[in-house]
Image (tube, helix red, strand yellow):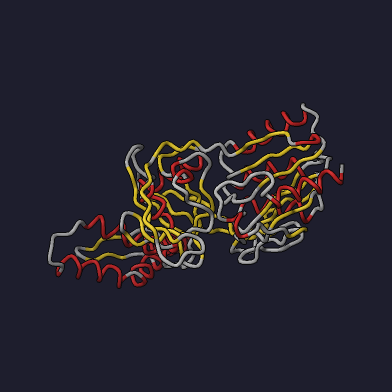
Amino acid sequence: MISKKRAIALTIAAVLLTNVITFVVSNSVSIAFKDKFIVSKEDYQNLKDFNKLFEEKDKIMYYYVDKLDENKLVEGAVRGLAQGVGDPYTVYWDPDEYTANMVQTEGEYAGVGLVVEPKDGNVYIVSPIEDTPAEKAGLKSGDIIIKINGKDVSGNNLDEAVSLMRGKPGTSVKLTVVKAGASSPTDVSIPRANIVLKSVKGEMLDDKIGYIRITAFQANTAESFKKALGDLKAKGMKGLVLDLRDNGGGLLDQCTEVADELIGEGTIVYTIDNKGEKEVIKSDKNKLNMPLTILVNGNTASASEIVSGAVKDTKSGTLVGTRTFGKGLVQTILKLGEDKKSAVKVTIARYYTPSGVCIQGKGIEPNIVVDLPDEAKQKPELTRQEDVQLNKAVEIVRDQI
């Protein structure tokens, strides 16, 4: 005969066991009963949400006239999921695209040498990279690529366009381009080559005025910038012109390291994510402590706008040129699959300049607006006399010295 205490204890144990089983069944694993499964509430909802996708796949596989590769359908569905966000910066990268994009971030890849951005639904050339096949072929900022090897491309699938332009060195790619100011397209055949991106270039101008140009913010840009800055200081530099024109952006940590050299103690930039969480990136007390101008234009974008915004808001220098591109979004790269060879690049936050402005779609207005003459805009390279923006920046630094 079971005592009263033991009966109560057994009852409690049975209730606890029942609760544990219920929790596991409803929230954790799928349990099979012959040809049926018990799944979690969350998994069931996911199955319902994507039921149309599974149904479409089954019907295509059953009815399509030719034999299909199911893996390609899955890849297309995964790519379409990212496209469904409606953000040109949120994209899926297959293994080839992932490798190509990561190589470019590191500063070397095989292609034609173009920096491109999505703009108004188009593949817009921000700039050709110096001494590359694209520059030698005469492509310029403002040109729009509409086809690659006869295939239509758009800014809504920018990474596909980038992937098509890359390939083995020595092979050629045909770009169909609408030149800036032209009404009809032109075909341009360009040989691919190994593109080694030298993102920083420095020299001393007259009157001990230093000039540093940054074309992109890559893995080694901050280190290269500090070296160029140190070399110019050692030569007696009294003021600096930093050229960020046609700089399409790059890595956040690299641009904030550069800004840290320029603005002294304070906020460089802050970001706010979809949960409202704020992350502030600050600089230390060290700063340039000499006259500074930054050259910007409509192709100064993303990471280069972070530097420009930090300098303008903290009054650490003078921005000269024209309004910047206006990309105030931050992306991260998340690897996918068991092999982690593909990835999705996702917009995860908006960034704000120190004064609290999100420049997305707006850009940054320079302190002093100086536009290039129309004839100068059509030239791949300007002489010092023709570059009125640089001349104005030098004049400001000279006056402040």
Q: In screen coordinates, is 272 left or right of 391?
A: left
Q: Is residue 185 visible?
A: yes
Residue at position x 30%, y 69% from top?
53
Q: Is residue 5 above or below residue 208?
A: below
Work out whether residue 122 or residue 372 is closer to the camera in this orientation and state it. Answer: 372
Q: In screen coordinates, is 349 left or right of 309?
A: left
Residue at position x 38%, y 52% from top?
188
Q: In screen coordinates, is 211 left or right of 54?
A: right
Work out whether residue 231 or residue 398 is closer to the camera in this orientation and state it. Answer: 398
Name the spot of residue 9 as percent of width and height, x first.
Answer: 46, 60
Work out whether residue 88 or residue 173 is closer to the camera in this orientation and state it. Answer: 173
Q: Is residue 2 visible?
A: no
Name the spot of residue 292 as percent of width and height, x first.
Answer: 78, 45
Name the spot of residue 379 as percent of width and height, x first.
Answer: 56, 51
Name the spot of residue 308 as percent of width and height, x first.
Answer: 70, 52
The quarter in which the C terminus is drawn is top right
Work out whether residue 320 or residue 285 is closer to the camera in this orientation and state it. Answer: 320
Number of numbered markers: 0
The quarter in which the N terminus is drawn is bottom left
Q: In screen coordinates, is 238 left or right of 251?
A: right
Q: Which residue is at the far top?
A: 234
Residue at position x 77%, y 36% from top?
206
Residue at position x 67%, y 61% from top?
323
